[in-house]
Amino acid sequence: MSELLALRNHIDGHYVDAADGRRLDVVDPVTGEVYAHAPLSGAADVDAAMAAAAAAFPQWRDATPATRQRLLLRVADAVQARAADLADAECRDTGKPRALTLSEEIAPVVDTIRFFAGAARMLEGRSAGEYMEGMTSIIRREPIGVIAQVAPWNYPLMMAVWKFAPAIAAGNTVVLKPSDTTPASTVLLAGIVGEVLKDMDLPAGILNVVCGDRETGRLMVEHPTPAMAAITGSVRAGMEVAASAARDVKRVHLELGGKAPAVVFADADIAAAAEGIAAGGYFNAGQDCTAATRVLVHESVHDEFVAALAKAASETRTGGGVDDEDMFFGPLNNADQLARVAGFIDRLPEHATVETGGHRVGERGYFYAPTVVSGLRQDDEIVQNEVFGPVVTVQSFTDEDQAVAYANGVEYALASSVWTRDHARAMRMSKVLDFGCVWINTHMALVAEMPHGGYKKSGYGKDLSAYGFEDYTRIKHVMTAL
């Protein structure tokens, strides 16, 4: 057996082990075998990372927007140059197809960093003015301070970038924790950023990465140093972070779960809708809070659509290695997630029908077949709760009002899509669907310029876009006597 890879924290510009030497196993989800160890960081490690970020903050806060832009542009170039290494790390932790990871994740990561590099020099505010006789008012937008950030395991590298890039562009410093199951690419990214910081003679503590488990994340959020906590994760985790942050009135940014409806009307291009929804439902094994997991289709085209979706699902390949170019999605991330997805199928009510899939693929790793379930009702568990796996459910509706009621009738409100040739209907639906994003005749298309974030139990705050950038700033009113 080859020696296990040893991952390390990156604090104040240095790779270091946990202070007490504790480690976590990191499992390759393709094989189910341990391939690496990562630090199980405790209070001493969190203290060290927070101290480094706090020490770096004054200089970084006072840096010009041009300096912040130069840093991020150089980081983007360095990430692009190390794309193959980052993809190797990402695929080892997640089992994702390497070619898709390079094109659909690494390339957008570089683009996102470059977007926020530009945003650093485009922070807008209201003009100065006299609103009281003899007084002039101005508005300052300032960085908040040290930001504690926690990223998830479904898109480890991309979510790390969505977190740190806007925060640093705005002049904050960061302590970031990757998921305990997927730390490798974030640890590598920290080293890449650290090299750029050193070359530019900037404080090493601008970005710090600590590995660990749920307890490590709790220590970060409860720590007195950060002024803000930002997390992408489950609703449970978000609620715990919000409750913890409330104790010392930290700002909170939450991007949580989703249960995205895809509403298919009778006039839609059924073949295109089935193909698009299959892609949006099965990409990354459905481990995406915006995934098209819940189809609502007009009763007149229900059977036609179900047949088309089942065909698309049955032709979607999983179960190979990361270099298998025919594989569309890899394994579920971990054994617990495999059991969770299988549990939803095992508990299906008698009125539900598994049209295709509904089973594990292979005996090694955590692969699950692309699955379509029809015959479901609005109050069924699998309709109401996030599965986070390659499972797409189908319900029928009779009219537009019922479609809206079904679509909005869940606790999540992140993303949705509408499939129709009727422009007026598309505009009506975009108004009444209670989701942070509404796609029309497509699903899961994201660009750095547009915001990503939801309502209800999907959280609050925005990632990406100028809105996401502004979330990492505070507003100050300055009034001076003339």
Image: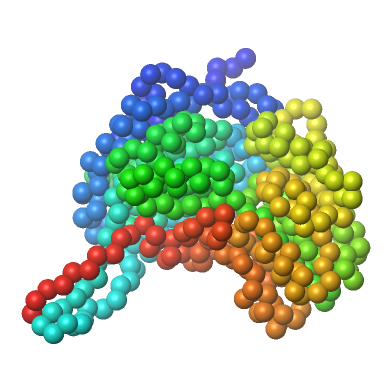
Closer to us: 431 or 119: 431
Residue 223 in the image: x percent, y percent?
A: 34, 38
Residue 182 in the image: x percent, y percent?
A: 55, 35
The quarter of the picture where the N terminus appears is top right
In screen coordinates, is 175 left or right of 138?
right
Closer to us: 427 or 173: 427
Furthest toward the top, the residue is: 1
**Which colour style is shown?**
rainbow
* Image quadrant in which you'd find residue 64: bottom left
Residue 347 in the image: x percent, y percent?
A: 81, 40
Q: Image point 44% across, 45% down: which residue?
A: 243
Residue 233 in the image: x percent, y percent?
A: 54, 45
The quarter of the picture where the C terminus appears is bottom left
- Classify 216 as above or below 202: above
Total numbered badges shown on the rendered structure: 0
In screen coordinates, is 231 left or right of 125?
right
Q: Is residue 77 visible?
A: no
In screen coordinates, is 203 left or right of 334?
left
Q: Image point 59% across, 17% down: which residue?
A: 2
Closer to us: 234 or 349: 349
* Image quadrant in which you'd find residue 193: top left
Closer to us: 93 or 79: 93
In screen coordinates, is 98 left or right of 61?
right
Q: Is residue 178 visible?
A: yes
Q: Image point 63% across, 56% down: which residue?
A: 411
Furthest toward the left, the residue is: 482
- Classify 464 as above or below 385: below
